[in-house]
């Protein structure tokens, strides 16, 4: 009744910000991401008769904030297995947690896969998608490898997730410039809910999103890097414009984030195949073709306020590392 699973975080190139149904945690928009090989969440789950409640240890300390969402996922798994045992969940990241590096995505993907393995469940991939989504709207994408599409349109009220491009087919690289390891002040969940309620731009975001997503998907089909750069930066800046126009405002960037954006734009203007994206935190992710990674890394490391860079190739979906039966 104990299993360990690993998952990589992912970064959305066409993003999700806002829910259409908070109870079922349904995103208001689809999204397109890449899975970040090189960064890992490792999660061990043990179901036991000795436990009186579910417990979560995140990077070695109890985490109350993630508890409620975790229990929702565990409840779904228990229901499938027909058991009522509580679980002890130990999760650790080899990258900064809660700082805009998608630790909730890899966390809930690893939790779902480890929990299903511990309970000896063979669930369909789209059922794992549904369960992990209850924890985090970006988690289903970490169940899949390479370029990943989370589709909200083809089956209303549901989310369908799949790989659109395996890592070897289009081996993009991502260099993360870490500019702060502080936990963000406003979580994505809270931030996107206030944008929905209190930004005049929310309808424009949702209305213009399907075209960005269609464009992003066709760039993967054609392996068109420069067109992907254009639509991904546009979509990222539009998400941040929405966040900034929320009341009270959500400003996730640091001065170093902005300096990195400008450096990436300048590199691309000089013909280097690179573009940026930034999630709900101050880290910048520079997506590039392999031949550009050395120059991009060197440029980002020279920017004051960049604490470190992390190198990622495209990675695989969440996987089970070990299972121990009682
Ligand atoms: O999955 P959540 O609730 O942590 O929200 C993710 C939001 C962004 O990372 C900013 C965008 C995305 O699509 O991943």
Image (cartoon, rainbow, N blue to C red):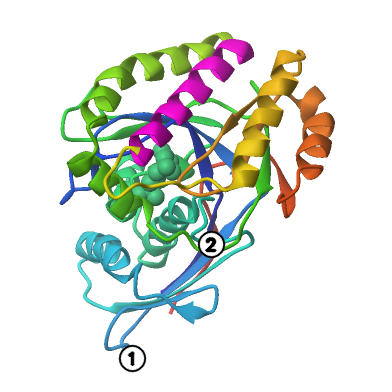
Residue for point 49% across, 17% down: 231
- On whether residue 228 falls in the magenta region, the answer is yes
Label 1 sits on residue: 50
Q: Position of residue 32 (x, y in %)?
A: 44, 29
State whether residue 240 appears in this view. Answer: yes
Residue 31 relative to residue 261: left or right: left
Q: Nearer the viewer, residue 99 or 161?
A: 99
Q: Nearer the viewer, residue 217 or 181?
A: 181
Instruction: Specify few, some or many for label 2: CA neighbours under 10 Å numbering under 14, 14-19, or 20 or more.
Output: many
Residue 285 relative to residue 135: left or right: right
* For discs 1 and 2, the disc positioned in front in the rendered view: 2
Reply above or below: 97 against 123: below
Q: Which residues are magenta?
A: 225-244
Instruction: Specify few, some or many for label 1: CA neighbours under 10 Å numbering under 14, 14-19, or 20 or more.
Output: few
Ligand 1 is found in the corner quadrant, namely top left
Q: Position of residue 55 (x, y in %)?
A: 36, 80
- On whether residue 199 falls in the magenta region, the answer is no
Label 2 sits on residue: 97
Residue for point 37% across, 40% down: 244
Q: State whether the magenta stretch is mostly helix, strand or loop.
A: helix
Residue 20 relative to residue 280: left or right: left
Would you say the residues marked 1 and 2 are in contact, meaning their CB atoms lie under 8 Å apart? no
Q: Position of residue 326 (x, y in %)?
A: 43, 80
Q: Nearer the viewer, residue 222 or 122?
A: 222
Residue for point 50% across, 55% down: 103
Reply above or below: 310 against 268: below
Q: Nearer the viewer, residue 217 or 160?
A: 217
């Amino acid at each position: 009744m104990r299993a360990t699973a690993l998952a990589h975080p992912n970064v959305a190139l066409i993003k999700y910000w806002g829910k259409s149904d908070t109870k079922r945690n349904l995103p208001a928009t689809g999204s397109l991401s890449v899975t970040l090989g090189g960064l890992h969440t490792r999660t061990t789950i043990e179901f036991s008769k000795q436990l009186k409640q579910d417990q979560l240890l995140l990077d070695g300390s109890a985490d109350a904030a993630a508890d409620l969402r975790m229990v929702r996922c565990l409840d779904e798994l228990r229901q499938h297995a027909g058991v009522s045992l509580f679980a002890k969940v130990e999760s650790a990241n080899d990258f900064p947690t809660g700082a805009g590096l998608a630790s909730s995505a890899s966390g809930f993907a690893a939790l779902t896969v480890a929990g299903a393995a511990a309970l000896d469940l063979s669930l369909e991939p789209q059922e794992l998608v549904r369960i992990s989504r209850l924890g985090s709207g970006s988690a289903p994408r970490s169940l899949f490898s390479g370029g990943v599409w989370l589709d909200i349109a083809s089956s209303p009220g549901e989310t369908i997730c799949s790989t659109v491009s395996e890592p070897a087919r289009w081996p993009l690289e991502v260099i993360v410039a870490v500019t702060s390891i502080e936990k963000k002040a406003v979580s994505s969940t809270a931030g996107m809910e206030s944008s929905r309620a209190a930004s005049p731009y929310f309808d424009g975001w949702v209305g213009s999103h399907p075209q960005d997503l269609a464009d992003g998907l066709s760039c993967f089909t054609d392996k068109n890097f420069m067109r992907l750069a254009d639509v991904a930066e546009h979509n990222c800046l539009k998400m941040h414009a929405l966040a900034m126009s929320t009341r009270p405002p959500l400003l996730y960037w640091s001065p170093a984030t902005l300096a990195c954006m400008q450096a990436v734009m300048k590199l691309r203007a000089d013909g280097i195949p690179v573009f940026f994206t930034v999630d709900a935190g101050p880290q910048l992710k520079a997506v590039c073709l392999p031949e550009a990674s050395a120059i991009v890394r060197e440029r980002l490391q020279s920017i004051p306020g960049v604490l470190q860079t992390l190198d990622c190739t495209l990675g695989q979906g969440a996987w089970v590392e070990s299972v121990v039966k009682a």
